Image (cartoon, grey):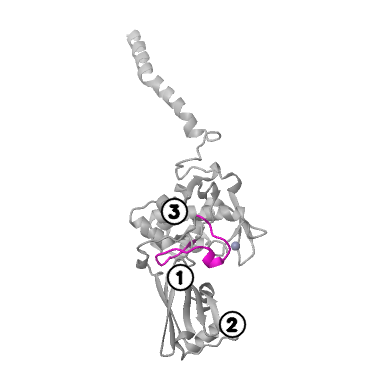
């Protein structure tokens, strides 16, 4: 009887226990040893740590207090994505925003604007940031947890990924709504263009509230606003040619407008009159000057509503990024 038991045990050992032990040993290096294998290269699951090496911690300047806070990169990106894009946008659009924001941050670290920090929390200067506490308080209570989890997931699912052109992080500009077509940086800020930032069309942006807006001014209100920069401005409102768009940019935005005795750029007109973009038309009637505006923002790089539209049509975040940035590659930051 004992013999049978021993034979049975040997049988069980050879058939079940031994293969199980060998299999486990084989699996061990890929599941637990993260030091030298290239675990950071692809497909990290959400809870695995990514080693950002030099970029793990960033110095974030809070503009209103002047305080510089050290924050972990992906934690910072959750705050940025939640500040920059509505949480009810499609997952793939939010993932695109996460990769764009990560790229923008790395670019800013490499091309510093602030002496004492890598980046600041002001959207007019660097990139918007909002604390988790403030962000949550602005959402409906029932959506707080699911919204934050969704954003964390988009940051985690794209861990380590940045957009590159010729092996370097790109200057990943983005804006709210392109009005259907994006703009070249030279037409907004002067200087030089970037090969990956071209004029790109996207359908479907008209379905968003940011697409159309108006600014209506009386004659004296217009003069008052223009006087801030042009103190000697004079406009003969009886003359139809006194207010006139003179030139358009490559994306059909306004390049130059004639206001009486001055020719003012579309970008400056936007700032002085508080227009949402430089894609506008002007009409005059009964002492009223109406600016009918398309789109929201400078128009360069990725349009957020365009990204959401593309995601709704079934495009993934890589396709969205490759639509708005020409000839780029999404790469692992540690591979460049
Ligand atoms: Zn800044």
Q: Distance between the residues labelled 3 and 2?
A: 40 Å
Ligand 1 quadrant in view: bottom right
Q: Residue 253 got which mark?
A: 1
* Residue pictured at 42% horizontal, 58% vertical: 147
Mark 2, residue position: 230
* Residue pictured at 55% horizontal, 35% vertical: 35
Residue 258 at x, y percent in the picture: 51, 80
Q: Of discs 3 and 2, which sits in the foreground? A: 2
Residue 191 at x, y percent in the picture: 58, 63
Name the magenta segment's main secondary structure: loop
Q: Which of marks 2 and 1 is nearer the N terminus?
A: 2
| Quadrant containing the C terminus in the rendered view | top right
What's the magenta region? 174-195
For residue 67, side relative to residue 88 (left or right): right
State the SS at label 3.
Answer: helix
Q: Which of marks 3 and 2 is nearer the N terminus?
A: 2
For residue 18, side relative to residue 193 (left or right): left
Q: Does the residue labelled 2 lie within 8 Å of ligand 1?
A: no
Disc 3 vs disc 1: Cβ atoms closer than 8 Å?
Answer: no
In the rendered image of this protein, does residue 261 appear above or below residue 100? below
State the SS at label 1.
Answer: loop
In the rendered image of this protein, does residue 219 appear above or below residue 180? below
| Quadrant containing the N terminus in the rendered view | top left
Answer yes or no: is residue 149 visible. no
């Amino acid at each position: 009887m004992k013999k049978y038991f021993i034979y049975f045990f040997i049988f069980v050992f050879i058939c079940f226990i031994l293969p199980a032990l060998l299999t486990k040993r084989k699996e061990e290096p890929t599941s637990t040893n993260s030091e030298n294998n290239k675990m950071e290269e692809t497909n990290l699951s959400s809870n695995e740590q990514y080693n950002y090496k030099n970029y793990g911690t960033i110095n974030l300047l809070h503009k209103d207090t002047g305080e510089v806070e050290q924050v972990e990169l992906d934690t910072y990106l959750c705050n940025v994505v939640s500040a920059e894009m509505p949480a009810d946008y499609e997952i793939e659009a939010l993932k695109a925003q996460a990769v764009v924001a990560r790229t923008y941050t790395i670019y800013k670290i490499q091309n510093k604007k602030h002496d004492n920090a890598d980046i600041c929390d002001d959207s007019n200067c660097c990139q918007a940031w909002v604390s988790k506490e403030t962000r949550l308080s602005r959402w409906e209570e029932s959506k707080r947890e699911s919204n934050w989890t969704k954003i964390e997931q988009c940051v985690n699912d794209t861990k380590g990924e940045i957009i590159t052109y010729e092996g370097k992080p790109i200057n990943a500009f983005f804006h709210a709504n392109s009005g259907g077509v994006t703009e070249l940086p030279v037409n907004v800020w002067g200087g030089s263009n970037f090969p990956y930032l071209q004029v790109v069309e996207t359908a479907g942006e008209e379905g968003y509230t940011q697409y159309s807006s108006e600014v209506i001014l009386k004659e004296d209100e217009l003069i008052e606003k223009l006087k801030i920069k042009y103190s000697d401005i004079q406009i003969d409102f009886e003359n139809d040619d006194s207010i006139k768009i003179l030139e358009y940019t490559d994306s059909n935005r306004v390049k130059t407008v004639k206001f009486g005795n001055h020719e003012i750029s579309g970008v400056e007109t936007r700032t002085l009159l508080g227009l949402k973009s430089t894609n506008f038309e002007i009409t005059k009637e009964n002492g009223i000057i109406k600016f009918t505006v398309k789109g929201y923002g400078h128009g360069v790089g990725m349009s957020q509503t365009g990204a959401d539209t593309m995601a709704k049509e079934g495009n993934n975040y890589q396709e969205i990024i490759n639509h708005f940035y020409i000839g780029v590659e999404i790469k692992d930051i540690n591979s460049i």
